[in-house]
Image: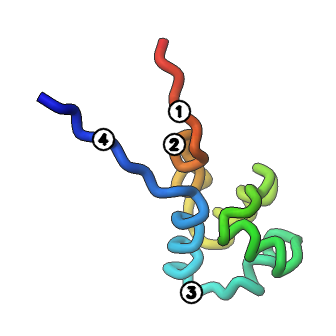
Amino acid sequence: MARKKRTTTPWNEILREKIELSGMKSEAVAVKAGVSLRTVFRWLDGEAVPPVSRAVLIAYAVGCSLDEIWTTESLGHKESKR
């Protein structure tokens, strides 16, 4: 029997969804995170990954935990098996 392949959502898509659900605009996220609007767009497009210090500020601003945005799988890393 074939195993079902597990799919994950990339962190930038999760981030975009959380921002939309919060009702915030990208400009407000940039201000809260202390970065330029261009930087926020690069994060949302998946061109760059925010440092943890900025990701914590974003998560707080949009009303979610950092774990909801960033998981090992959403960042494209495979969990190590012990």
- Location of residue 59 in the rendering, given as x and y in whole percent from the top left corner: 64, 63
Asked if labels 2 and 1 touch by Cβ distance under 8 angstroms, the answer is yes
**Residue name at image x 71 percent, y 83 percent:** 26
Q: Is residue 31 visible?
A: no
For disc 4, the neighbor class at 10 Å (few under 14, some 14 to 19, many from 20) is few
Q: CA distance from mark 1 to mark 2?
A: 6 Å
Quickly name the residue at label 1: 78
**Of the residues under marks 1 and 2, which one precedes in the sequence?**
2
Judge left or right: residue 33 versus residue 72. Answer: right
Judge left or right: residue 70 versus residue 55. Answer: left
Asked if labels 3 and 4 touch by Cβ distance under 8 angstroms, the answer is no
Q: Count of labels shown?
A: 4
Q: CA distance from mark 4 to mark 3?
A: 33 Å
The image shows residue 73, relative to residue 22, as above or below, that is: above
Residue 5: which disc?
A: 4
**Of the residues under marks 4 and 2, which one precedes in the sequence?**
4
- Location of residue 52 in the rendering, given as x and y in whole percent from the top left corner: 76, 50
**Of the residues under marks 4 and 3, which one precedes in the sequence?**
4
Quickly name the residue at label 2: 73
Q: Secondary structure at mark 4?
A: loop
Residue type marked 1: Lys
Judge left or right: residue 80 versus residue 62. Answer: left
Residue type marked 3: Gly
